[in-house]
């Protein structure tokens, strides 16, 4: 682990083996199994580093974060390869873009470090009334395994640019890129500013959430664990933000599919939105596909053809489109959902590639499944599967499809596909989600507001405005001359 600028082991001397997701027989490394005492050490290191880091001129933090960005850029390929090994995400379609996003986020927040500033009130000639944006103190950033570098990038540079120090808790299934990131950054940051601990959520994760000296918990993970984290952090009135699960709707209007060329482009972009290239292990996956009945058959056929052609394989192979599922538990969970979906009345299978994979691969691999003629009430349409499974549902009436889209306790992302500005914007505005994309299906853009409605989360940290809200508190100063 990285604590106070040093590589450290766990106090109790325990370890966790890290197995390669794509090659289960390969143990990549072992990482310390941190517990309460280790959480405490990391928080103390972050606390000790806080005053000096906070008190720097912003230009100094900017310079340091800029150097970290440069060093991470130099190491981007190494980080991408490590991501592919650690998470099972395919190198070309997923791991490289993730490493690049981390670099971009460090550059962005280095650039805007001077914008964490307050305002003055025009309160008369004999008064100076102004606000300061002060950092919160020590932030605990709790990370999931699905795209660790990108999510560490959503938290770390923003928290540090604002003058906080941070303790990251890497996910037990994929901790290696986060440790490597900290190692690279250590050369440019004072000891204790960026710490990384490893171990199980119920042990060191819980200890961080409970720690009285952690001022903010920035959690990304499942809604179930998020609720527990929220109540534990709320109990001691710590600041918190939660980036949780999703079951995002994708709504296709006939205007987006007027001819074969449009249908082909649409299918390509829809495929991106399904996040099949990440084995569906993405919180923003457009996993409920509502296609208008007039173009249902053509659009579904085009998406299905492209999905079925995806190459499932070794995450390190450049030809691979879809890598490995993270672990056996997740693999079994996905298969339970597929069995459940296959048992629904009236279900049709547009793509059934869940077992159709080369058997020489030593990992949990799975091709896409697309259920057709689905119903929004089915479990596979309501619950987050976090696997390469899509449910296509026909619709005819705009109000009805918006009602179905909003009939979910999640509200993270959404996709609208239309060639008509009025219907596209009317739909985008009426969807209860924190992020709606029109006619595109890619990932988050640096600096955008990102976060969930409803049970998909609380807080926005990726935009400058969100980071100011999320990583500072406002102090008002009123002075009489
Ligand atoms: P998870 O909730 O099981 O674990 C997330 C992290 O929390 C891990 O580091 C884990 O060790 C830790 N943790 C577990 N119990 C804890 C506790 N009691 N106290 C503190 N920490 C604890 O999630 P996961 O399986 O790693 O990730 C998948 C989930 O994350 C999906 O639901 C997905 O939608 C969600 N996710 C959301 C976003 C987003 O931006 N909204 C991004 C990625 C993933």
Image (cartoon, grey):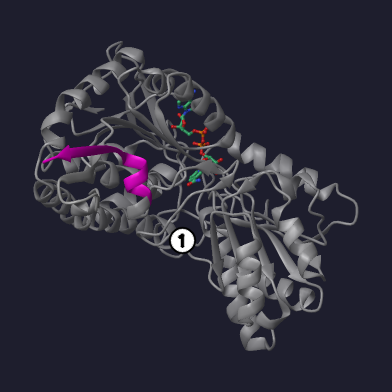
Compared with residue 164, is residue 322 higher up or lower down, i.e. above or below? below
Front residue (pair 428, 174): 428
Q: Which residues are magenta?
A: 466-481
Residue 5 percent coordinates (x, y): 15, 30
Query: Who's the residue at 17% across and 26% down the image?
Result: 4
Query: Who's the residue at 26% across and 27% down the image?
Result: 1
Residue reaching furthest to the top: 12
Local secondary structure at mark 1: loop
Left or right, 268 with reference to 78? right
Front residue (pair 74, 160): 160
Residue matched to label 1: 443
Residue 140 percent coordinates (x, y): 34, 30
Q: Is residue 309 visible?
A: no
Left or right, 391 with reference to 141? right
Residue 318 percent coordinates (x, y): 41, 63
Residue 229 percent coordinates (x, y): 49, 27
Residue reaching furthest to the right: 345
Left or right, 116 with reference to 251? left
Compared with residue 225, is residue 82 higher up or lower down, i.e. above or below? below
Q: Magenta segment: does it hold 382?
A: no
Q: Is residue 412 visible?
A: yes
Query: Who's the residue at 72% across and 43% down the image?
Result: 337
The quadrant in which the C terminus is found is top left
Left or right, 3 with reference to 264? left
Front residue (pair 5, 92): 5
């Amino acid at each position: 682990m990285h604590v106070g600028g040093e590589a450290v082991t766990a106090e109790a001397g325990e370890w966790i083996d890290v197995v390669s997701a794509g090659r289960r027989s390969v143990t990549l490394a072992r990482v310390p199994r941190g517990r309460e005492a280790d959480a405490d050490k990391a928080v103390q290191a972050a606390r000790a580093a806080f005053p000096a880091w906070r008190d720097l001129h912003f230009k100094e933090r900017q310079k340091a974060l800029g150097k970290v960005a440069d060093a991470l850029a130099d190491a981007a390929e190494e980080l991408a390869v490590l991501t592919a090994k650690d998470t099972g995400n395919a190198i070309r379609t997923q791991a490289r873009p993730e490493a690049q996003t981390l670099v971009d986020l460090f550059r962005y927040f280095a650039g805007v470090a001077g914008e964490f500033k307050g305002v003055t009130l025009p309160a008369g000639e004999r008064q100076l009334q102004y606000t300061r944006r002060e950092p919160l103190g020590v932030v605990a950033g709790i990370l999931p395994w699905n795209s660790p570098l990108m999510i560490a990038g959503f938290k770390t540079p923003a928290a540090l640019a604002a003058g906080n120090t941070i303790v990251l808790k890497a996910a037990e299934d994929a901790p290696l890129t986060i440790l490597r990131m900290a190692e690279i950054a250590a050369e440019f940051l004072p000891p204790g500013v960026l710490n990384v601990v490893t171990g199980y959520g119920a042990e060191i994760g819980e200890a961080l959430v409970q720690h009285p000296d952690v001022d903010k918990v920035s959690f990304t993970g499942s809604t179930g664990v998020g609720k527990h984290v929220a109540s534990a952090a709320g109990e001691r009135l710590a600041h918190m933000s939660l980036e949780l699960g999703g079951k995002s709707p994708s709504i296709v209007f006939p205007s987006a599919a007027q001819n074969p060329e449009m249908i082909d482009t649409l299918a390509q972009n829809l495929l991106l939105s399904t996040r099949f290239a990440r084995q569906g292990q993405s919180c923003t996956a457009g996993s409920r596909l509502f296609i208008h009945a007039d173009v249902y058959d053509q659009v579904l056929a085009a998406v299905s053809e492209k999905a079925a052609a995806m190459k499932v394989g070794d995450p390190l192979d450049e030809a691979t489109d879809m890598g490995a599922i993270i672990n056996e538990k997740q693999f079994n969970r996905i298969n339970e959902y597929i069995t459940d979906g296959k048992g629904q009345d009236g279900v049709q299978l547009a793509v059934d590639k869940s077992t159709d994979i080369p058997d020489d691969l030593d990992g949990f691999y799975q091709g896409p499944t697309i259920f057709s003629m689905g119903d929004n009430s089915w479990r596979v349409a309501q619950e987050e599967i976090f696997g390469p499974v899509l449910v296509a549902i026909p619709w005819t009436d705009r109000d009805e499809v918006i009602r179905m889209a909003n009939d979910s306790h999640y509200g993270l992302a959404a996709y609208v596909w239309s060639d008509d500005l009025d219907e596209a914007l009317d739909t985008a505005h009426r969807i209860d989600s924190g992020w709606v994309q029109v006619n595109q299906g890619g990932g988050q853009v640096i600096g955008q507001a990102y976060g969930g409605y409803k049970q998909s989360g609380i807080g926005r940290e990726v935009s400058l405005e969100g980071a100011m809200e999320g990583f500072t508190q406002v102090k008002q100063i009123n002075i009489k001359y």
